[in-house]
Image (tube, rainbow, N blue to C red):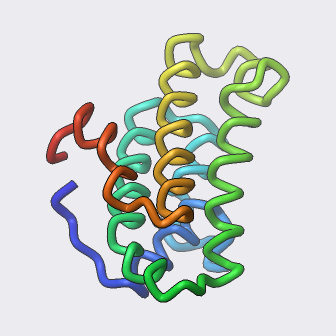
Amino acid sequence: MSTQYDVPTALERLGFHSGRDPHIDDPRWTNGFLSSLRPYRGIKLVEKNFHDIVACLRILIEVFQQKTISKNLVNDMACIITFGRAWGCHPDGMLKSNNLISDKDASHLDEMINDISYIWTMILDDMEDTAFHDYDRLYGDI
């Protein structure tokens, strides 16, 4: 994704994507990754948010190089990964159990969450060189 953020903006955007930012009237909250699943408004919005999360993680590599990260960042990422999968991919989750998401879209959502999880894990393990390799191979310069 060609959008470039500074570190504070990337952290703020992840707060909106996780639904943890207290400014619920802000359109970034309403259109964030998890909020786009409640109510589900289609895979295109979710995919746009997926790419934005990856762009934020690219910016935050400098935060990880400092060897200390905030509890808020960890919680934002845990919410995105855990609730995204629980709500949209799990058979008993609200989208699957209520037939609000197709099997194809749920599978695509699961792939995006797996990519986010992989990138997050590689960054945490100081493997920034390989963190984005699969993403870049699949999506190029989005």
Q: Position of residue 78 (x, y in %)?
A: 69, 58
Question: Is 6 on the left-hand or right-hand side of 81?
Answer: left
Relative to 52, does residue 90 appear above or below in the rendering?
Answer: above
Q: Position of residue 16 (x, y in %)?
A: 55, 68
Q: Position of residue 46 (x, y in %)?
A: 46, 40
The residue at the point 53 percent across, 30 percent down is 109
Relative to 108, does residue 83 appear above or below in the rendering?
Answer: below
Question: Is 46 on the left-hand or right-hand side of 72?
Answer: left
Question: Is 71 on the left-hand or right-hand side of 34?
Answer: right
* Identity of the residue furthest to the top in this view: 103
Q: Nearer the viewer, residue 78 or 96?
A: 78
Q: Position of residue 3 (x, y in %)?
A: 21, 65
Q: Nearer the viewer, residue 74 or 65?
A: 65
The residue at the point 39 percent across, 52 percent down is 131
The residue at the point 64 percent across, 84 percent down is 70
Q: Nearer the viewer, residue 5 or 71?
A: 71
Please identify the quadrant where the N terminus is shown. bottom left
